[in-house]
Amino acid sequence: MRMCLASMSFKRGLPPGEEIQQGWKYYTKPRQCDGDYVYYQPLGLCYKIHVEQKSFSDAMAVCESEGAKLFIIEDEREFQYIKQVLMGVAATVGIGPLIGLRAIGAGREWTWWNGQNLTYLAWIIGQPDNFLNNEACVQLNSYHGFKYNDVSCAYALSYICQRYL
């Protein structure tokens, strides 16, 4: 195995979970999420799927009590990842979990709970439809490949929390 002396000091100075050099290859130690949270390495965040059903505001309150917020989907890769996870637990999440996307204002501008700009949307065809003028929150609908569906914010659904390490 080839190793230079500089790599030894490089390894000693890294905090747990950071890259370490072994020979000429780099490896990453897995990070740990506490509680029932699962680590999602590409974004450096932990997420948890809650199967108990809550309204949007109650779900956000539970997430906040855990030091987290409702889940944000930033791109296609993240959508495909969480979709695969949800397909594995579809029987426990019912018709699909709430995420942190909602419509605000008279113009019904869709925004994430933190005001972050939308960079990726995956609506079911015909959605959002604001049925009965009462749908301002979003769930990942299990009957339609976990694509976005607008629902009433008062409607109780499973939900996904996220927090960064």
Image: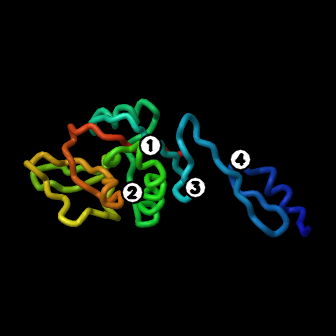
Q: Which residue is mark 3?
A: 41
Q: Which residue is mark 1?
A: 49
Mark earlier in primary sequence (3, 4): 4
Q: Badges 2 and 4: C-beta atoms under 8 Å apart?
A: no
Measure the alpha-carbon separation of dots 4 and 1: 29 Å
Q: Which amino acid, by three-letter code, is at mark 2?
A: Ile
Q: Is residue 18 visible?
A: yes
Quadrant position of the C terminus in the picture: top right
Q: Which amino acid, by three-letter code, is at mark 3?
A: Gln
Residue at the far front: name it. 91
Question: Circle 4 sits in a helix, a strand or a loop, which is it?
Answer: loop
Measure the alpha-carbon separation of dots 1 and 2: 14 Å
Q: Which amino acid, by three-letter code, is at mark 4?
A: Pro
Residue 151 percent location from the top left of the image = 21, 48
Question: Circle 2 sits in a helix, a strand or a loop, which is it?
Answer: loop
Q: Residues within 10 Å of mark 1 (few under 14, many from 20)?
A: many
Mark earlier in primary sequence (2, 3): 3
